[in-house]
Image (cartoon, helix red, strand yellow):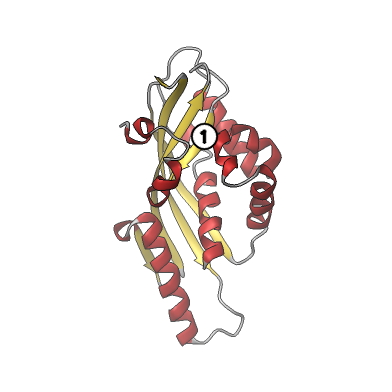
């Protein structure tokens, strides 16, 4: 199930790709943050993974190189072990930009429903199916919280409410924004290259 966590991380981004079509977001005049975010997600949806790297928070590559990240994304996008559907995508908020240590930051928040079906073996017995469902449900609850995860036994889909924050970074506070999804369980790692004031800013 370790690989599944990486797959879900990518699908979380894909699920928000049409968010701005459902809500009018107010940003400062001349600020390209909304457009840059859409360009980033669109490049992932179109499997233009090398292009998508232009929008990734640059310090993240100290943890995972561009080449490694592109390779992982290519493997994930070709995954045939699950089916994923998205519903009700919406950007909830784009915060005003603020300056920290001679860099400009902003925070975005988005949500969507994500329905996931994980395929079992061709001749899977009932005991193995129960173990597969239990294992997947446990992972999803760790990532999204137990109250946000449900399982529909009729359709064999997990029904998950996703709400995520994204850090956006720019040198001038107007354009060329770079993005990083905030994961609570990874905050200790993020603190190594994201100012603590940014992480804790509401």
Residue pointed to by mark 1 = 179
Residue 112 seen from this side:
no
Picture coordinates of residue 7 (x, y %)?
A: 56, 57
- Work out which residue is located at the far top of the displayed protein and give it: 29
Picture coordinates of residue 52 (x, y %)?
A: 64, 37
Q: Residues within 10 Å of mark 1 (few under 14, many from 20)?
A: many
Picture coordinates of residue 3 (x, y %)?
A: 56, 63
In percent of the image, x 45 and y 40: which residue is there?
192
- Does 135 appear above or below 43? below
Q: Which image quarter: residue 43?
A: top right
Q: Quadrant of the C terminus?
A: top left
In percent of the image, x 51 and y 52: which residue is there?
9
In the image, 14: left or right of 197? right
In percent of the image, x 39 and y 68: which residue is there?
138
Which one is nearer the viewer's eye here, 21 or 68?
68
Residue 143 seen from this side:
yes
Q: Which image quarter: residue 191?
A: top left
Picture coordinates of residue 6 (x, y %)?
A: 54, 56
In percent of the image, x 47 and y 41: which residue is there?
181
- Does 46 appear above or below 174? below
- Does 81 appear above or below 55? below
């Amino acid at each position: 199930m370790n690989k599944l966590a990486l797959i879900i991380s990518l699908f979380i981004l894909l699920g928000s790709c049409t968010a701005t079509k459902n809500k009018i977001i107010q940003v400062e005049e001349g600020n390209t943050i909304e457009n840059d975010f859409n360009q980033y997600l669109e490049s992932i949806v179109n499997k233009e993974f090398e292009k998508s790297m232009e929008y990734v928070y640059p310090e993240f590559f100290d943890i995972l190189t561009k080449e490694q990240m592109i390779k992982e994304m290519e493997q994930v996008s070709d995954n045939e072990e699950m089916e994923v559907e998205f519903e009700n995508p919406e950007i909830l908020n784009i915060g005003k930009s603020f300056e920290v240590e001679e860099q400009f930051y902003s925070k975005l928040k988005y949500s969507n429903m994500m329905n996931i079906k994980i395929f079992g073996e061709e001749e899977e017995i009932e005991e193995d199916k129960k173990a597969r469902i239990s294992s997947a449900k446990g992972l999803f609850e760790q990532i999204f919280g137990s109250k946000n995860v449900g399982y529909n036994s009729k359709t064999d889909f997990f029904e998950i409410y996703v709400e995520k924050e994204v850090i956006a970074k720019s040198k001038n506070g107007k354009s060329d924004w770079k993005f990083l999804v905030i994961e609570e369980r990874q905050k200790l790692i993020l603190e190594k290259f994201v100012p603590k004031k940014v992480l804790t800013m509401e």
